[in-house]
Amino acid sequence: MIQFVTGVCRQHPQVAIFLALAVGYFVGKIKVFKFSLGSTAGVLLTALVLGQMRIDVPDLLQTIGFALFIFTIGYKVGPQFFGALKKEGIHYIYLSLVVAVTALLTAVGLSRFFGFDPGTAAGLMAGALTESTIVGTADGAINNLALSAAQKQLWLGNVAIAYAITYIFGTAGRIVFFKLAPRLMGLSLKAESKKLEAEMSGGADSSSDPSLFSWYKQVGLRAFRLEQGGSTVAQIERSFPGQAVVENIDRQGQLLDSKPDLRLESGDILAIAAIASVLSQGAKLVGPEVDDKAACDLLGEILNVCVLKPDVVGQTLGQLGRRFGGGIYLRKMTRQGHELPLTRDTVVHKCDVLTIAGSQKVIDSAVKQVGYAERPTSASDLIMIGLGCVFGTLIGLVSIPVLGVPVTLGVGGGVLVAGLVCGWLRSVHPTFGQIPGGAQWILTDLGLNLFIACLGLSAGPKALHALQTTGGSVFLAGVVLSLVPMIAGLLYGRWVLKLNPVLLLGALTGAGVITAALNTLKEDADSPAPALGYAVPYAFNNVILTVWGSLIVHIFAR
């Protein structure tokens, strides 16, 4: 049976690749004490085991998988990366650089001390920092070296093996670090998060503050017959003790558009939206409540809007609430896919996504003033993806001599740059280059794991020997490398930048590109507040650490 399976996999390597993906995803979902390996580590470990059958995997598939993955990563973080270069993100950039430079210096020092080859050094950094893009750029750098095929294969195999050895602690160890960090700092993460939200809300309860237009769950719509005419719509709205919006006006069977300066007449039926306590004053301030289905029959819409307009970027939710509060209700705000707290002082960044609800006409007006409506679609701009990968590959082939050493971005680095530019252009001109969220997930997750599966299958035959000879030292080095940059960043952010501890911890998960730790912080804080500091460091270090993969290979190959 084993011989039959081995024969099939050798003759048809795609069988081994799909098997590595299927089993690897299953292994990655298994939880032990609430911790799981994740799909990437699961696929790599499965591929290393299957690789003992000595299967020849086409290099082309590996290259295409990584190109799709790295392009989409660049596309996703491009707007935040270029936005971080502006003044408001400068502290987070300093923090990101401290973490990235400390990681590089620590990796070089440990690799020198233990005598690791370039492949092991790169794999050590990729696994300890859980930055899979390093594997791809290191792989490209090794292939561009003037070495024998056997030497290249040895180093390429060591990248995968070192990555597998260090990845588990790189994830689990740093999650534990972020669970312990608040206690080591002598603070309660939950209390600090609530304190931060209170400060950003001006002391108000952000969940019910109408000025933040976030009270949609409590809003009702009722109709009242106006007894005394002469007032304008704006005057009627201001007469209520809280925020109230005249959504529709029924005048003798004819529906009129609600405009602030529209003069109302006796007998007009007003459809008013407000919370229950405010609507209870309607009979006294307007007139008797009536049952008018025509006035209350509003075409509502819930829509995701990507923030792009310059006069909205940099505004707080409190400012936007005063500007757009009438008839618009904010349901959710996300940044890099992570939900943010809806507080008065939460600052809106470019490409944040606001989920708003309201009548269709009001929503349409708001979209024009905020950015671009992300309406559901299944279509991806494959023209942009294809051309982006072409030009990125060409950029990666350009060689620039530095101190006599030819340095290239490599295919991975070049395609990353192309993705960054395409993502930024998409934010500037949102009429092209759309890649829906589901398609982004497929391209990143499947692209990366195709690459990892091929890499693991190729490295499998050397895995046991490498584990026996260098496994212990690589694991130990990985433990040190996982923690030292985080500790350096914590000290720098706390004592030099003096960042709020909740924002600092969230920013460190971004600088360490470890989303699992951010989710842990949000759970421990019982608040989305840590996500406020995550996006800029995540975008910046996704790029910097990717470049480190090529750099560390060239440092040790000299």
Image (tube, rainbow, N blue to C red):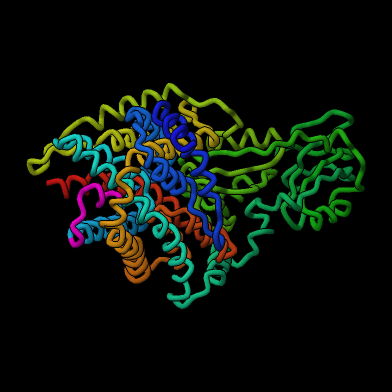
Residue 423 visible in rendering: no
Q: Position of residue 251 (x, y in %)?
A: 85, 33
How many dots with numbers? 0
Q: Residue, x 71% and y 49% (percent of image)?
A: 216
Reply yes or no: does residue 117 show up in magenta: yes
Q: Is residue 228 left or right of residue 209?
A: right
Q: Is residue 508 above or below residue 404?
A: below
Q: Residue, x 39% and y 58% (percent of image)?
A: 170
Q: Residue furthest left?
A: 404
Q: Position of residue 124 (x, y in %)?
A: 30, 54
Q: Residue, x 37% and y 46% (percent of image)?
A: 132
Q: Position of residue 87 (x, y in %)?
A: 35, 52
User: In the figure, residue 91 lies in which quadrant?
Assistant: bottom left
User: In the figure, residue 6 lies in which quadrant?
Assistant: top left
| Secondary structure mostly seen in the magenta stretch | helix
Q: Position of residue 549 (x, y in %)?
A: 27, 46
Q: Is residue 159 above or below residue 505?
A: above
76 or 321: nearer the viewer: 76
Reply yes or no: does residue 474 show up in magenta: no
Magenta residue span: 113-123
Residue 223 visible in rendering: yes
Q: Residue, x 37% and y 35% (percent of image)?
A: 66
351 or 345: nearer the viewer: 351
352 or 8: nearer the viewer: 8
Q: Is residue 538 left or right of residue 226?
A: left
Q: Is residue 404 left or right of residue 219?
A: left
Q: Residue furthest top?
A: 383
Q: Is residue 413 above or below residue 473?
A: above
